[in-house]
Image: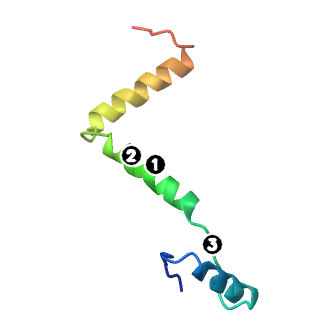
Amino acid sequence: MNIQIQILNPEVRAILDQLVKLNLIKITKEEEALLFSNLLNRIRGNSGEELSLDEITKEVESARQKRFNGGQKSD
């Protein structure tokens, strides 16, 4: 079971550390998960409108053409 706790009094940290030493609780930092979540939210927030299937297909075809033709466009 996971519970998120906001510590309001810094002295409580000492009590929590004692509980960790007794193997009663485990404290983990969720900073990395939070950073990743914030990054995803920023990316999703900047996306604007969703691409249509036709627009996605054009982007894929353009990337393939650049990859296989060495970046030269063949018309």
- Residue position marked by numbered label 3 in the rendering: 28
Q: Position of residue 32 (x, y in %)?
A: 57, 58
Question: What colour-coding does the image apply?
Answer: rainbow
Kindly identify the residue that appears in the image at 63 percent across and 72 percent down: 28
Pick the quarter of the image with the C terminus: top left
Distance from the alpha carbon under mark 1 to that under mark 3: 20 Å
Disc 3 residue crowd, few under 14, some 14–19, many 20+, Cα 10 Å: few
Q: Position of residue 11 (x, y in %)?
A: 60, 80
Disc 2 residue crowd, few under 14, some 14–19, many 20+, Cα 10 Å: few
- Residue position marked by numbered label 2 in the rendering: 42
Residue 50, compared with residue 38, is above or below; it is: above
Pick the quarter of the image with the N terminus: bottom right
- Residue position marked by numbered label 1 in the rendering: 39
Kindly identify the residue that appears in the image at 34 percent across and 35 percent down: 56
> Which amino acid, mark 3?
Thr
Q: Earlier in the sequence, mark 3 or mark 2?
A: 3
Q: Answer yes or no: do the residues labelled 3 and 2 have beta carbons within 8 Å?
A: no
Q: Answer yes or no: do the residues labelled 2 and 1 have beta carbons within 8 Å?
A: yes
Kindly identify the residue that appears in the image at 38 percent across and 46 percent down: 42
Residue 62 in the figure: left or right of residue 71: left
Name the foreground residue: 1 vs 6: 6
